[in-house]
Image: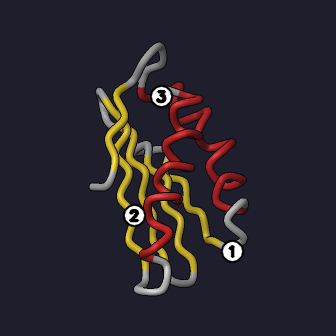
Amino acid sequence: MDLKIPYGSNNQASAYESAKKIIPSAIEKFGVKADVKLSDSDHTIQAKGTGFDAKIEFKDTEVVVKLDLSFLLKPLKGKIVEALEKQIKKVV
């Protein structure tokens, strides 16, 4: 786990629904192509691309972000996590 964000004014379902709309565009801002898979049943967003794998889970009380990067992308991990955190905080 790389990041935990507790819910503010939203709950699990509404935060997930809002995030589904903004997360794909947030990933595109990094100039990478990603295969984004949405799982409405367990409120999870997964994105896989060349050299990275991201999983965003909307749990009962918080959002958990897990990010695995290739060796070449590891120096950018802080910046990527920060950008995802900023986007997720907009919806929670």
Of callouts 2 and 3, the N-terminal one: 3
Reply above or below: 76 against 64.
below
Left or right of residue 10: residue 63: left
Depth-wise, is mark 1 or mark 3 nearer the camera? 1
Q: Which numbered circle lies on residue 67?
A: 2
Residue 49 lies, in percent from the top left, at 57, 77
Task: Give, as a three-letter code, the residue at label 2.
Answer: Leu
The residue sitting at 41% across, 86% down in the picture is: 71
The residue sitting at 44% across, 65% down in the picture is: 77
Of callouts 1 and 2, the N-terminal one: 1
Q: Pointer 2: residues within 10 angstroms few (<14), some, or many (20+)?
A: some
Q: Which numbered circle lies on residue 75?
A: none
Q: Secondary structure at mark 2?
A: strand
The residue sitting at 42% across, 58% down in the picture is: 55
The residue sitting at 68% across, 42% down in the picture is: 21
- For residue 74, what is the image quadrant? bottom left
Task: Give, as a three-letter code, the residue at label 3.
Answer: Ala
Q: Residue furthest top?
A: 9
Q: Which numbered circle lies on residue 13?
A: 3
Reply above or below: 30 against 89.
below
Q: Secondary structure at mark 3?
A: helix
Colour scheme: secondary structure
Reply above or below: 59 against 37.
above
Residue 64 lies, in percent from the top left, at 34, 45
Residue 11 lies, in percent from the top left, at 43, 21
Residue nearest the viewer, comparing 51 with 74: 74
Report which residue position mark 1 lands on: 33
Task: Give, as a three-letter code, the residue at label 1.
Answer: Lys
Of callouts 1 and 3, the N-terminal one: 3
